[in-house]
Image (cartoon, rainbow, N blue to C red):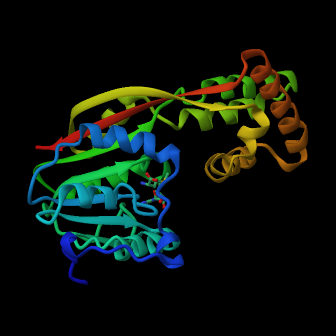
Amino acid sequence: MKKKTSYLDYQFTDSAEFVSTFDELPLWSASFGLLLLKHLELKPNLTVLDIGSGAGFPLLELAERLGPSCRCIGIDPWAHANNRAQQKITNYDVDNAEIITASAAELPFEDGSIDLIVSNLGINNFENPAAVFKECTRVLKSGGKLALTTNLYGHWKEFYNIFYTILETLNRPDLLAAVKADEAHRGTAAAISAMLAEGGLQPSRIFEESFDMKFLDGTAFLNHYFVKLGWLSSWFAIIPETDRIAVFTALEQNLNEYAGKHGVLCLSVPMAFIEGQKA
Ligand SMILES: C[S@@+](CC[C@H](N)C(=O)[O-])C[C@H]1O[C@@H](n2cnc3c(N)ncnc32)[C@H](O)[C@@H]1O
C-alpha cells in the first residue's frame, strides 16, 4: 500500500485522470448515505466492512471520516465498480481503505474479526439477503454492529399507482400482480429487522425518514440515466416485449398528465437506517 502524503505537503495537480474520479455518487445514493452517516457511531480502532461498496460509497467517505486508526474494507462482486473505487483510493491518497472483489454471502474473513459492517442500498441488490446477514453475524465480533440504509416499501408510490392504473385499464391482471410483487420486494423496516434477527443480529436502532424526488414530467423521469440503470430492466423483465410499447406509451402519457395537473412529478421515497447488534 502507498504511504499517505501529509496534508501539509498537499498540492493539487490537475489531470484528466484525476478528474475522471472527481464526481462522486448518484444523488439517489447520497440521500441514503447522509442518513447512514447521521446515525452511525464513529469510534477509534475499528475494522469496518462496507458490503456492496460499488464505486466507493460510503467506503471512502467512512475511511476519511474515521481516519488512520480504522481500517475500512469494501466488498463487492462488481469488478468495474471496484476498479473505479480503487482509482479513487489512489487519487484521494486514502491509506486506510481497500477493496475486495467478493460476494457478501461468502465473506473472506475469520469468525469474530470485524467491528462494524455498513451497507448503503445493498440489501435490495443482494440475491440472498438472509445468507448475507448470517455471514455478517459470523464475521462480526461479539457486540459488533451492522448498520444498513435502504428504501422501503412505498417508495415512488405516486409512480406505482399510475403504473397499476395503466395495467388495470389495459386489463392485464397478470402484469399487475407481477409489478406489485416487484414493488413489494422492498421490505418494511419491521420486515428487514425481522430478517436481521433471523440472521442472528438483535435490532438495536431504527430511524425512518423520507425525501422527495421531483421531475418535470414522466418523459424526463423515464429517460433519466439512473432510472434506466436501476429500474427499467426490472420493469422490462415483467412486461413482455410484445406489450412494452403499449404499456410504456400509456404510462409515460399518464405520468405527464399527472405532472401537468400537479405542476411537477413529485415522487416520495421512504427510507430507513436499520442497525442490528451481535450478542
Ligand atoms: C445500489 S448499489 C449501492 C452501491 C453503493 N453502496 C452506493 O451507495 O451507491 C448495490 C451494490 O451492491 C452490490 N452487490 C450485489 N450483490 C452483492 C453481494 N452478494 N455482495 C456484495 N455486494 C453486492 C452491487 O454490485 C452494487 O454495487
User: What's the residue at 17%, 61% (across, down)?
Assistant: 67
Which residue lies most toward the bottom here? 2
Query: In the rendered image of this protein, does residue 196 appear above or below residue 16?
Result: above
From this view, report whether residue 146 is shown above or below residue 20.
Answer: above
How far from the left and from the top, in percent, is residue 100? Answer: 35, 73
* Residue 29 visible in rendering: yes
- Between 23 and 51, the one lying in front of the other is 23
Residue 124: percent from left, percent from top:
48, 46
Does 111 sit above or below residue 13?
above
Which residue shows up at 68% across the image and 35% down it?
179
Tell which quarter ligand 1 is in.
bottom left
**Towards the viewer: 55 or 119:** 55
Residue 204 sits in quarter: top left
Q: Quadrant of the C terminus?
A: top left
| Residue located 22% across and 44% down the image | 200
How far across and down, in percent of the image, does residue 162 sit?
Answer: 74, 24
- Tell me if I can see residue 197 in this picture: no
